[in-house]
Image: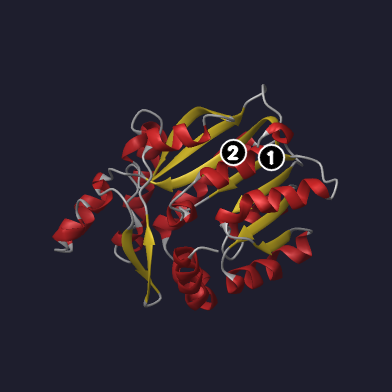
Amino acid sequence: MTTEMRAAASAFDAIAPRFDERFGAWLSVAAQRKAVRSALIETFPKGGRVLEIGGGTGEDAAFLARSGYEVILTDASPVMVEHARAKLRPLGGRAEVTPAEDLEHFAECWMSEAEEPLDGAFSNFAPLNCVVDLEPVARGLARLLRQGSSAVLVVFGTFCPGEMITESLRLRFKEVLRRTRRGPIKARIGQREFEIVYHRRAELTAVFAPWFSLEKTIGIGVAVPPSGAEPWISGHPGLLASLEAADRVLARPLSMLGDHVLYHFRRNEAQSPKTIE
């Protein structure tokens, strides 16, 4: 595990016991999560075997498991994984401590144990923004996923008007253009510092291009504000409902303006994972 990934894992270890309580009550988070879940159900074959990357406490994995999917959750934070296991075990799901950077090694172990290729993979709420080099992720997914299957990756948008407005109203002007910066940027959660990277569309497409084609992008939180608007926006459920309705119209044409952007990659037919060197 890289030094920076250890820092991120440590930060999320610290907040894991109160993570669901803190973020679960926020209606803006619930609205964005609902949009992603709708896309996942629409994308993955019913009853399929699906991998989650950076699944945290297992909220989305548990949702898919209750919806009839077989889910394997991975995360870099051991404490997060403990919470995820408690949710997934009764539902037949699995959770393992595996940083995203180690996904290629995870894939090698998976396939060497005569496991079948997976029917899909996803990552929600930007854990991949804690990963500087996404090539090991792309290579690992190429080994794991059957041809024609989907990888649904939700990362931070790089130009989010909602965040710009929110940070301006909070008088945090240094943060207004934060997402336009390139390279690692300091972040903080649970009083712990780590680094994140705002991945550009062109960079993502290039990293995954040897094995995946970008099928579409969907904006998650184009009108629905980011969590920085909490707890204020949760006190205005009527307004939030109107913003959700606007997102259903704007999510495709204005996808790159989302708080998060959902990248739907399709595993190419031409190259088998076994041929990747």
View extreme (front): residue? 277
Mark pair 1, 2: CA separation: 12 Å
Residue located beneath label 1 in the image: 143
Q: Quadrant of the N terminus?
A: bottom right
Q: Mark 2 — residue?
A: 151
Q: Is residue 120 visible to the viewer in this orientation of the structure?
A: yes
User: How many labels, in total?
Assistant: 2
Image position, residue 193 (x, y; %): 36, 71
Dividing the picture into quarters, in which one does residue 206 lie? Answer: top left
Quadrant the C terminus occupies: top right
Which type of secondary structure does the marked residue at label 1 adopt? helix
How many residues crowd around disc 1 within 10 Å: few (fewer than 14), some, or many (20 or more)? many
Q: Is residue 146 visible?
A: no
Q: Nearer the viewer, residue 74 or 109?
A: 109
**Mark 2 surroundings within 10 Å by alpha-carbon count, few (fewer than 14), some (14 through 19), many (20 or more):** many
Which amino acid, mark 1? Answer: Arg
- Residue drawn at x 55%, y 33% is 265
The reply to whether discs 1 and 2 touch (Cβ–Cβ < 8 Å) is no
In the image, is 107 to the left or to the right of 36? right
Mark carried by residue 239? none
249 or 206: nearer the viewer: 206
Q: Which residue is nearer to you in this view: 75 or 251? A: 75
Q: Residue furthest right?
A: 114
Residue at 49% x, 70% y is 12
Q: Is residue 160 shown above or below 211?
A: below
- The colour scheme of the drawn protein is secondary structure
**Residue that lies at the very extreme toward the top in this rendered image:** 270
Q: Is residue 197 above or below residue 246?
A: below
Secondary structure state at the residue bearing disc 2: strand
